Amino acid sequence: MRDLESPADTWDRLRGVMQGQIGKDSYKNWIDPLVFLGSENGVAQFAAPTSFVGTWVSRNYGEAIRQLLVKDGIPASRLSFSVQAPEAPAVAAEVPPVAAAAGEEAPQAAESDLPTSPLDTRFTFENFVVGKPNELAHAAARRVAEGGQVTFNPLFLYGGVGLGKTHLMHAIAHEVRRTRCDARVLYLSAEQFMYRFVVALRQKDMQGFKEIFRSVDMLMVDDVQFISGKESTQSEFFHTFNALIDQQKQIVISADRAPGEIEGLEERIKSRLQWGLVVDLHPTDYELRLGILQSKAEAQMLQNPGVTVGPGVLEFLAHRISSNVRVLEGALTRLFAFASLVGREINLDMAQECLADILRASERKVTIDEIIRKVADHYTLRISDLMSARRARAVARPRQVAMYLAKTLTTRSLPDIGRRFGGRDHTTVIHAIRKIEELKVSDAQIAEDVELLRRMLEA
Ligand code: ADP
Ligand code: MG
């Protein structure tokens, strides 16, 4: 019976499965815009609105789609994507996901009665590219934005500079304002919070200050590490925080590190912060960087008609530029500015020349901490095991691998490495390095482990 089905109907029937697998947004961004044209000689043919969408889908979801088709009895030994602009311009405007709000609009004016910091209109969920390193943070932010029952309170987002904390917080604020216009959302930096507090103190208007902060439905405080060491601000923050939690109002906090690691933060605040959900944004990996670059390049191309990006350029940047997304964005902006001035294609040579400083600055530096973490992960040991005095082979060997990697991937000295591994002597480190060098030749498993770890650490 299915023989009579048109490819469009088949696809309608099948593609819903993808939504369950990849989530609503990815589905909407990538799968929804595809048109299934049928299968010919085992090649399943799709039309995508842009070549970027086609490439992205093929790279990220190709295998899943292929299996879906094969399971349904449709021959698909591979997929092919052609570009076919959608007919209705309204659809074109929705795809790609980044383009819509991109631009240099001024930040939105603050709501009149709340001392909200300005929100960047570009920092929306649609413009946020999701990958392994940030999927948990993204999912949690989404959940909070959906509202309903307050499930984790506070939501504590942390991670290094430029990994998207502020972006996610603004996205939550935009989303809540869009879907629940009556909700009072207050977003501000911890610095702003302190400033308001100090002004209120000076003007002897603590009552007003308290009322404003305790009347909101959602409070978001960005970069909370800023109030470390500022005792009276912390104390006020703590009371505001408790008052809101008691009223079941949602709180979202960000910081550059985990609550427990913020020095100069009172213990009671640290522990209260850990009551909710603490999620970290990991440094970006290659795939995520490439995804972000593709999405931002597409937005740039709309703004700079005529500028094209040559093969391999985005891959090169994703490979060579550090995990900080802000740096990545800066590099791309510079390339587009340059290319549109001199009317050239962005190619590898030009990228290398134009970004020499950025490339030099972001030469990958592996840290001993990362090595320890990755090695512990790899062998499913605790970090404390690697640091411990235990000499059982199951612990000692991974420890030696870690020391070997520390020597070969960093510039740290032997005594330094010894110190970082639970205060060991440098001769222990030398012994470890010799041992692993030997084993790399005689023991295929160790050789493979070392190689895998090295690649992960240098990625
Ligand atoms: P943080 O607050 O963690 O320092 P930001 O949220 O300010 O970082 O992000 C820095 C820049 O990188 C912003 O322009 C932001 O839009 C962008 N960015 C970060 N992560 C992503 C992502 N996953 N997708 C798209 N843009 C991102
Ligand atoms: Mg920030």
Image: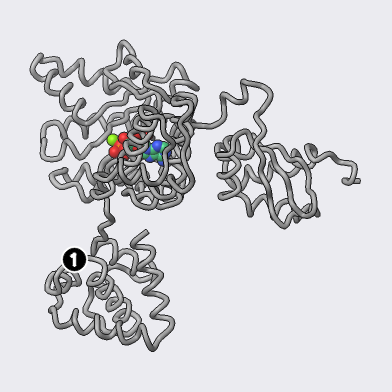
> Looking at the rendering, which quadrant does residue 49 occupy?
top right
**Residue found at the very far top of the displayed protein:** 112
Rendering coords of residue 285 (x, y %): 40, 52
Amino acid under disc 1: Thr
- Packing grade of label 1 (10 A; few <14, some 14-19, many >=20) is some
Q: Is residue 181 left or right of residue 200?
A: right
- Which quadrant does the C terminus fall into? bottom left
Rendering coords of residue 43 (x, y %): 74, 52
Q: Under tag 1, what secondary structure?
A: loop
Rendering coords of residue 176 (x, y %): 44, 25
Q: Nearer the viewer, residue 424 or 224?
A: 424
Q: Is residue 179 visible?
A: yes
Rendered view: 126 above or below 392: above
Q: Quadrant of ligand 1?
A: top left
- Identify the residue under disc 1: 411
Rendered view: 131 above or below 178: below
